[in-house]
Image (tube, coloured by chain):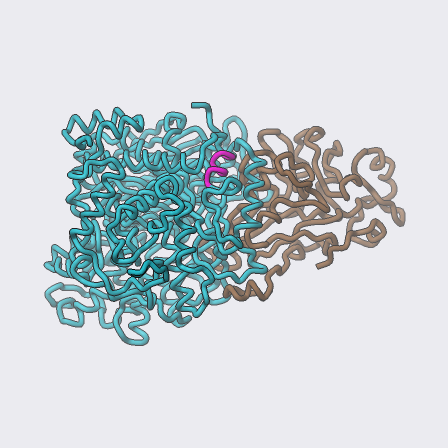
Amino acid sequence: MKKLKGYAGKILHIDLNNMTHHVLPTEDYYEWGGGHGFGAKLFWDLCEDIEAVIDGRDPRNVITIAGSPFSGTNVPSAGGRCEVTNVSVGLIPRNRFTRSNFGGHFSSMMKHAGWDAITITGKAPYPVYIDVRNHHVMIRDASHLWGKDTHETQQFIQENVAKIDVAAGWNAQLDGNDIGRTTQKASVLAIGPAGENQAALGCLIHGAGNAAGQGGNGAVFGSKNLKAISFIGTGSVDIADPAALVKARFKTREFYAVDVDKSTNFTYNGLSAGPAAITFSQMPTEHRASSCHGCVNGCKQRNAIGYGNEVTCQTSVWYLGAVRSYKFGGDAKLSLHNRSIDLTADSLYAGDLANRLGINTYAIMALIPWMQKLHAKGKLGVGKKIDSNLPYEILGSREFADKFCHAIATGTDIGAHFLDGVVPGVQALGHGADVDNGTLDYPYYGMPEHGYDTRAELEWGYATLMTDRDMNDHALNWIYWTVNLAKLSGIDLPIPAKEMATCFVEKMAPYIKPDEVSAMDYASHNMYSEVLARQVQWVNHYGRFWKNSALMCDFRWPDCVNLQREDLRGATGNDEVGEHVWWNAVTGEDISYVDGIERGRRILNLDNAIWVLEGRHRDDAKFADYIYDKKLTYSKLPTFLWPATNEAGEWDYRDMLGRSHCREGVETWKSHYYRAEGWDPDTGWPTRALLESMNMKEVADRLEQVGKLGKEG
Amino acid sequence: MSMNKNSSEMDTGRRHFLAAMGGVGMLIGFSGTAYAIRDDKVYIKSSGGALVVDLKKCMGCGTCMTTCSLVHHGKASLSLSCIQIEQDVFKPFPQDIQMSTCLQCHDAPCVTACPVNANKASEDFDFVRDIDPDKCIGCMQCIEACPHTPSRVQWNPTTRCAQKCDLCLNTPYMEEQGGIGGVQACRRVCPVGAIAFITELPEQSLPQNYVVNLRNENWAKSGKTIED
């Protein structure tokens, strides 16, 4: 393969066992794209004994933080995303190779420092942090940082890095034989006390609130005695066709992104969404929308109240139900039916607290109403069956948030039960039935429900079962927010359901034909259809390359429906501003939109091979019992509308509340999916023919050694 | 905000006094930079335009920076950008962001500091303060002379030349014509319209005069302040 532009050319391998670093040529990994592709292949190459690493805290675990050719460029909503891969902590029925992703400016600074990715093996003998200044790599003592929160840690390192002032406001960094200059602060990724204590609920934090946590990434850092990674760079990213890149970005700005000075279009995700803080509460007007590097419109915020910067989305709501309960009564379960400014400050405070301590707020959100119920029943509290000194009578207050988060981060009090994950902890406490019956909504793999129950939003659960974690892919979820928020706000959404479905289906090449609109029919009579298996294939393969590897933001891509456009057709797949246009302009390759999806298929198959080595079998892929046994009655919005047909074949937005899955149906759907992928339907394992057709003979050989190749045909 | 161009007649009386007549002979000897002589004094003619910014509108995406370096150098770089967005994500709004653009100073200390007239204000380009990389000898005196922090004149370690905002006069990687009357890449690409172009330069004694309010009623509908 020819030398590609867009890459820095080097991957940094840190060996903490020997406290050394090595350079791996990026060229050896081109075919995997970047991000997740890099992480999967590096894991395959560097993990000494994949089958034996059954917990992410094993020193043999390999954690990779990877950028892409887009990192550090102005490719819209792609320049600042970063992928994290490693073996998980705290999942069931077993840990597995998994992923997370965060935004901000880390991957862009890593690229400007001259690195495409950093991969870390082993365990340091004492607390360390990695300090990279352009090509200069240092593994430094972090004893003085151990115990500090994520914000303090970053600020300390940034101060240390920016020491040499060469001109007013410009700092010097050695850059080869010359001295580069920058006005920028170092970009730092850090853990807080939760990660230090190797809590499964620990996450990585960059900036004030960019987090990667679903998979116990913080615990992995902690287990390696790794406190932080810092990059400062004064270099640049070479671009194959800069004029084409600039031209496409101008077009995106003018014809696909919202014009904030003129437009009042209502939309949630996608390129046409406005620069708005996603906090689910009413922000004081004194704030800005803030964004990751290169974003077309930011979704985070920084405010004037002195805390809560970059608290966004999930982090802004993990305590929202509790705050409402404390102030206005009722239970602490999240509801977004009404928004009140009275709840905002306390919610931002709680989000900030979790960010500082480095806690994955997804994992703890469902614990709040569960603990409230147990306390009300007299089963949780001082001297109770579950003994805890937390002030549950003021659950929802700042004081409770402080004490609860401290307990989770330090593994003390109630937090001692959840060091190995929420579901294992709940089971050990004798309350496993609460997971089975949905009192705690952890529907798959011991991971919390993301807010989009699979009994309604089918693809969310299906794609999760076929991969490694709560999938966190909003490709189709645009519909949930746009349609249901419009309904809640009384906005007349001018897109009939069938047209909405058609717009999405048109982007689903190569798996769905443009006239197979039933691929977006979420009616109960279509829940287990073969076409829905191919739809999920598209979600998984598109996501594995364009989002997880090329690192286009999940909130902005794919852009299937765009309300700035008269024809409503989004940028995805478009030959002027679509995904492949950016890839080709940056790298100099000449690939199509579908070529990228095909690369995603290959990456997913490498993932699956790793999962199979780790013990995965078809039987693992199942929902918690309540998904089958109980009807969905709860939605954080009043409705759960999706495009669906009735028995007469008439399309409309129909409420998905009130239904459940059936076990046989899900198994039928799984068989469709396995056949579509070419995996053995009995086991879910890939076949030799499939792997060799994707130039992965080495992977097939490895699976054959352990007797885990799928049966052909 | 006025979009009218300056006339050279408007130059008199402004704070761009350069030198007493004693220096005229030497100054006139340089090619490139346009000077005006008034009242026995020599002035650099004012730039026909400059960029202004809204610190409360910027969202810190840095797209302006990498687009600036792309159109000028064909590379995505923060260090080579002529607009510098500095952020401290831990500070409260609005102190968390600083936007630094070249003010196209009336008295142009960077121009006057240049010993070889590589840094100039040419009549051909509406007096935009611009550096000719072919002439620059890399002495860095213009960088030192810039009175602002961060210095609006940057060091390019690859070419070993100084560079500064030329309002996109010299942009080999942008299809559109840049410069005054043309496109400024940072302004055009900014997702929220936090950068604007003006033709009547403000009083330059205070850089905050280049900080403006670009937020309208539509911005207020998004729940964010439109107050200064």
Percent position of residue A266, x then y: 48, 61
Q: Is residue A125 visible?
A: no
The chain coloured brown is: B
Residue nearer the viewer, A235 or A482? A482
Residue nearer the viewer, A336 or A458? A458
Residue range in magenta is A579-586
Residue nearer the viewer, A317 or B134? A317
Percent position of residue A683, x then y: 16, 38
Q: Main secondary structure of the magenta part?
A: helix
Please tell me the colour of chain A: cyan
Instruction: Examine the structure image and report whether residue A580 is included in the region drawn in magenta.
Output: yes
How many marks the image carries: the answer is 0
Q: Is residue A614 visible?
A: yes
Is A434 drawn above or below residue A2 in the view shown? below
Instruction: Examine the structure image and report whether residue A15 is included in the region drawn in magenta.
Output: no
Q: Which residue appears at 31% of the width and 42% of the height?
A: A537
Percent position of residue B19, x then y: 82, 44
Is A673 drawn above or below residue B139 in the view shown? below
Percent position of residue A311, x then y: 39, 58
Q: Which residue appears at 20% of the width and 54% of the height?
A: A422
